[in-house]
């Protein structure tokens, strides 16, 4: 009996050791896979610091790099920082307060970051939710459950953290705007805010809308209605993509869509989403390199075609307006195709990470 007991205990000990060894190997594989998916901070910094487009934008006297890096990325850093007792930024309400202040500063410095407001609120609303699906991507449900989908998000957005973020953002933005108007007069309000709602430009414009603007001689009634498709897509992406793990990717998709559909697109607009690209961790590992390179080459080719056509029109004076417009249409299609590849890569990454968690 003693021998049988000892043998049984030895077998059980070996089984425990083998189980622990397998678990340790599984955890090591998970860590290695995460390291492969996440680029090093140095590489991410170099991707932006030595980006030729960002450098060229700075050489012409534009402060675009400062505007996109200081307020926007700092806001993203505050929002995505985990609350730890040893951290200076602890507690979701403290983070919501600081993020709202920084977001108000960024919107005052440049209006376009206002498109991230709903995404930040959705992030805080989901972070405070006790739902078991907090680590999975929120997919837009079928029309039959669309009302329940909106009800869930309405309740999440009314939680204390999202409301605190919204209130601090509005107070900061309103206070800075009031000071600007008080110091510089009505011109600060017109040039800083209202001008962007009615701005139309048919020169140096990559937009799909430049040719209709040119034919209408810049007199387009109801030009503000062109913002409706952008607003719809911003709401869908804010509620359908915002996740504790892929907030950077959500902001990138929103900026990319906003720029692609905007009525005015210039070269400096490209820096708005390029600065967010390093935050989209793991896309290069999840995406098919061949598809990604093809989509990127398609975008680059469309840009070069547009630049060549615009050179003939603006510098050589040739009547190639339709050719430039067709190049703008091609550029629009290339951007949509690239975004499609990136979203599919993100879905593939999310699927693989969920499988790892289940295992």
Image: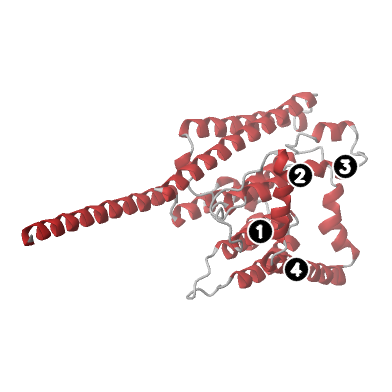
Q: Is residue 69 left or right of residue 321?
A: left
N-term mark: 3 or 4: 4
Q: Secondary structure at mark 1?
A: helix
Residue 167 is marked as 4
Q: Are marks 3 and 4 in contact (CB under 8 Å)?
A: no
N-term mark: 2 or 4: 4
Q: Is residue 201 left or right of residue 216?
A: left
N-term mark: 3 or 1: 1
Q: Nearer the viewer, residue 330 or 141?
A: 141
N-term mark: 3 or 2: 3
Q: Residue under circle 2?
A: 232
Q: Quadrant of the N terminus?
A: bottom left
Q: Could you tell me residue 93's position as x and y percent?
A: 63, 71
Q: Nearer the viewer, mark 3 or mark 1?
A: 1
Q: For the residues marked 3 and 1, what is the alpha-carbon distance in whole angstroms?
A: 28 Å
Which residue is rendered at x = 54% and y = 49% of the image? 280
N-term mark: 1 or 2: 1
Category of crowding for the residue at label 3, using alpha-carbon neighbours closer than 10 angstroms: few (below 14), some (14–19), many (at least 20)? some
Q: Secondary structure at mark 2?
A: helix
Q: Residue under circle 1?
A: 120
Instruction: Give the colour scheme shown.
Output: secondary structure
Q: Residue under circle 3?
A: 223
Q: For the residues marked 3 and 4, what is the alpha-carbon distance in whole angstroms?
A: 30 Å
The answer to which image quadrant residue 159 occupies is bottom right
């Amino acid at each position: 009996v003693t021998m049988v007991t000892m043998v049984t205990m030895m077998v059980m000990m070996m089984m425990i050791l083998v189980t622990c060894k397998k678990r340790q190997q599984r955890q090591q594989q998970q860590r290695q896979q995460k390291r492969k998916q996440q680029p090093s901070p140095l590489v991410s910094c170099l991707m932006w610091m030595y980006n030729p487009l960002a450098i060229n934008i700075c050489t012409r006297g534009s402060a675009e790099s400062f505007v996109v890096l200081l307020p926007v990325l700092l806001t993203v850093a505050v929002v995505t920082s985990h609350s730890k007792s040893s951290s200076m930024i602890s507690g979701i309400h403290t983070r919501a307060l600081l993020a709202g202040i920084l977001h108000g500063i960024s919107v005052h410095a440049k209006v376009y970051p206002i498109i991230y407001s709903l995404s930040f609120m959705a992030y805080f609303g989901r972070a405070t939710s006790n739902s078991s699906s907090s680590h999975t991507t929120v997919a837009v449900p079928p029309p039959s459950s669309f009302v329940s989908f909106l009800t869930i998000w309405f309740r999440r957005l009314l939680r204390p953290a999202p409301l605190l973020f919204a209130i601090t953002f509005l107070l900061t933005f309103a206070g800075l705007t009031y000071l600007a108007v008080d110091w510089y007069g009505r011109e600060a309000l017109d040039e800083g805010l209202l001008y962007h709602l009615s701005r139309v430009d048919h020169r140096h414009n990559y937009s799909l809308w430049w040719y209709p603007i040119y034919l209408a001689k810049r007199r387009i009634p109801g030009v503000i209605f062109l913002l409706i498709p952008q607003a719809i897509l911003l709401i869908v992406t804010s509620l359908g993509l915002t996740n504790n793990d892929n907030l950077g990717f959500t902001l990138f998709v929103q900026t990319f869509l906003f720029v692609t559909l905007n009525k005015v697109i210039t070269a400096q607009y490209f820096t708005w989403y390029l600065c967010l690209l390093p935050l989209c961790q793991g896309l290069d590992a999840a995406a098919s390199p061949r598809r990604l390179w093809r989509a990127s080459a398609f975008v680059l080719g469309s840009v070069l075609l547009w630049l060549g056509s615009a050179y003939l029109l603006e510098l050589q004076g040739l009547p190639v307006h339709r050719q430039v417009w067709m190049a703008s249409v091609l550029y629009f299609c290339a951007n949509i195709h690239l975004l499609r590849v990136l979203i599919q890569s993100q879905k593939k990454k999310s699927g693989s990470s969920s499988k790892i968690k289940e295992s």
